[in-house]
Amino acid sequence: MSVTYKAPLRDMEFVYYELLGGQDINQLPGYEDAEPDTIKAILEEAAKFAETVFLPLNQSGDEQACQLNDCVVTVPDGFKDAYDQFCEGGWTALTEDPIYGGMGLPYSVSVMMSEMLSATNQSLAMYAGLTHGAAKAIHACGSDEQRKTYLPKFADGSWSGTMCLTEAQCGTDLGLIQTKAIPNEKGSHNLTGTKIFISAGEHELTDNIIHLVLARLPDAPPGIKGISLFLVPKYLFDADCNIGDRNPVTCGAIEHKMGIKGSATCVINMDDAEGYMIGTEHKGMQAMFVMMNSARLGTGIQGLAAGEQAYQGAVEYARDRVQMRSLTGVKYPDKKADPIIVHPDVRRMLLTIRAYTEGCRAMTYWIAQELDQFAKNPDADRREEADDFASLLTPVIKAFCSDTGFDSTNLGVQVYGGHGYISEHGMEQFVRDARIAQLYEGTNGIQALDLVGRKMAMHNGRLVKRFFTKIGEFIAQENQNESLAEFIKPLVNSFSHLQQATGWIAKHAAKNPDHAGGASVDFLRIFGLVTVGYMWVRMVKIAQENQQGSDAHFYKAKIKTGRFYMQKLLPQTSSLLASIEAGSDSLMEFDEAYF
């Protein structure tokens, strides 16, 4: 029997409204329709859809996986029907621009929906998620004609999008790309090359697939500054978007993977395939980063979703599985043994999953709402602030949420014991599916380098200073609040560790860049721990003020989970700081021959 899932709507609404003030989002120009009642109804319907349409296909999709025959990919049984229902329900249009057939709802609403879809079927959810990123890139950097052509098709779900970056010789270092784009007499380009690891690169879910491809023009300068971005459709089409001949862009193979087996991960071959440039020559990375940043946040959401699914399955099992008696005496005398949920180590695992998941949800939703502010707030200063927070925390959300999500799935297996290792219960699939989130859209080590190497220095350190000011002001405001004292003190300590780590890196990295590289992963971890700690203190404060009434148990559980996080998880910052201040010598002085 596989694990079940119920969308955590109560916690989602707590974070969105009570913590972040999402009830006021409809005050932003363009979001007038985002009334609280409307959003609540959307979330309830999204939960039903995820639980009844996506979830039943999760385990069977993993077992059947995608198949390739004669360059045609067949998705697992039921995926096509589920995707069609997804489109018919209007879910593909949720946050797209109304000018092009979308509903124009806030991005933060789609984040909550994405969490539910990913938690129920990560493989199936990916087909639609990549299309949203492609739409954002075209909307931001495409021509008016390109927007009018592609965006309505993305909004109704009849066409889908991919992101074609990686090649056999280059993943992170995109300056090594070799795919060529040759101008032709029609004003378009002919692209030749091979891309690998292309999610949803070939399938029959949609009428057309639009590949966003990085390639080089004949006169391109070397390195990253010589890359342009192109739209390469699977099928060519006329001015009315009627499908025509097959473009010579084909699937040469699908990868046989550890997880997300229902998602087609393809080798894509282009042999003089017709493509259309987005933006200007040699500026492709600027456009692609729009899609990449969207994908990185989406990957963080996958980690969050994995944690939630693992938690629900582990709690259900821990309540039912009886083994031994409690260390402090019999708790269930009517049973031959006590349920394992009475044992301290099982509780440690469950609370670790819960504290990380609820904390990551708060951090991710916060930045999602900041992106809504950046998109719609008429005040330039507020938009700048929102952009700073989102830019700074995007690599943190991607890496921290995917790291803790994967850790949570492993803890879920551990709660199950041997039963978690076999496929019957479904828990081992979560481990395999969650692992990819630490790898794609830039490995988590790359996210750490981005945080240390780019985001810390951006705008003369303005992003970090703004973030530190926000937390510092909150601490100053609540430092004398006796009811929060046990929560504020650990936050003060960990925030001090983050500041010290920042200062150490700033001082030593200029002299030896390896110090920054060696410290980067630990630094991102501290950053994530502190950010989630800040969110937890804010959540506890709200919960302390709402311990009466029918929902008292929810708020009391929130306080107790927050206490666990502050006492048991946040103190990691101390050892991480010690590791950072040890420098990189022990890493770099090790002779290569000794490996």
Image (cartoon, rainbow, N blue to C red):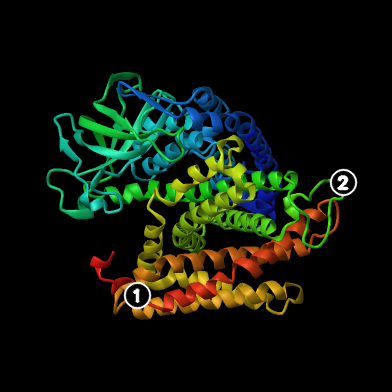
| Mark 2 surroundings: few (<14), some (14-19) or many (≥20) residues within 10 A | few
Q: Is residue 32 visible?
A: no
Q: Please, is residue 183 above or below residue 542 in the view?
A: above
Question: Residue 212 vs residue 356: left or right?
Answer: left
Looking at the rendered structure, the kind of residue marked 2 is: Asp
Q: Residue at x 83, y 60 (%)?
A: 329
Location of the C terminus (image quadrant): bottom left
Out of 591 and 32, give the one closest to the viewer: 591
Reading the image, the residue beneath label 2 is 334
Please provide percent x and percent y for residue 4.
66, 37
Please provide percent x and percent y for residue 458.
38, 67
Which secondary structure lies at badge 1? helix
Please provide percent x and percent y for residue 88.
55, 25
Which secondary structure lies at badge 2? loop
Question: Residue 36 vs residue 208: left or right?
Answer: right
Out of 8 and 340, give the one closest to the viewer: 340
| Mark 1 surroundings: few (<14), some (14-19) or many (≥20) residues within 10 A | few
Looking at the rendered structure, the kind of residue marked 1 is: Ser
Q: CA distance from mark 1 to mark 2?
A: 57 Å
Q: Can you tell which mark lies on residue 586?
A: 1
Out of 365 and 324, give the one closest to the viewer: 324
Please provide percent x and percent y for residue 90.
55, 30
Q: Tags 1 and 2 in contact by the CB under 8 Å rule? A: no
Question: Residue 586 vs residue 303: left or right?
Answer: left
Out of 213 and 276, give the one closest to the viewer: 213
Q: Is residue 24 visible?
A: yes
Question: Residue 309 vs residue 397: left or right?
Answer: right
Location of the N terminus (image quadrant): top right
Q: Is tag 1's residue or tag 2's residue first in the polypeptide sequence?
A: 2
Q: Residue at x 76, y 55 (%)?
A: 342
Q: Can you tell which mark lies on residue 497?
A: none
